[in-house]
Amino acid sequence: MTAEDSSNRGRLDLAVRTGGHMYLFKFKTWQEKRSGAAQEQLKERDYAAKYRLLGLPIHLVGMEFRSQIRNVEVFESALA
């Protein structure tokens, strides 16, 4: 597990290698409406590139929290 994992395109919030899989997490907060920004940023900045040579399935997990109620409002995952 690596927190705040840096790459040439930014900083990934959390990378977890377990059970023969890589899980890459991006966390965002929002005020007014759901945006899908966490999942979009994972793909746009290609955070998975750093891990492709491992040959493991890579899961991109975007989580968005609503700041007023401090609750997870968006949870999206996709294979890279």
Image (spheres, helix red, strand yellow):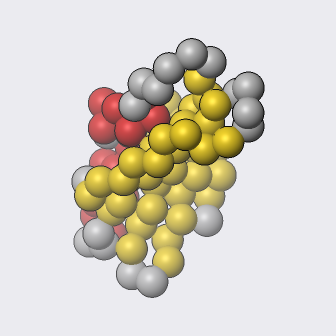
Residue 50 is situated, as x and y percent measured from the top left of the image, at 37, 51
> Residue shown at 28%/64% (left/top)?
53
**Residue 69 falls left or right of residue 35:** right
> Residue shown at 36%/53% (left/top)?
77
The residue positioned farthest toward the front in the image shown: 69
Residue 39 is situated, as x and y percent measured from the top left of the image, at 38, 38
Q: In this view, does 58 lie above or below 29?
A: below
In this orientation, does residue 45 appear? Answer: no
Quadrant location, the C terminus: bottom left
Quadrant location, the N terminus: bottom right
Q: Is residue 4 above or below residue 23?
A: above
In the image, 33 versus 13, the foreground residue is: 33
Q: Give the tally of numbered discs.
A: 0
> Residue shown at 45%/83% (left/top)?
19
In the image, 38 versus 55, the foreground residue is: 38
Residue 47 is situated, as x and y percent measured from the top left of the image, at 38, 43
**Residue 25 falls left or right of residue 20:** right
In the image, 66 versus 59, the foreground residue is: 66
> Residue shown at 42%/24% (left/top)?
35
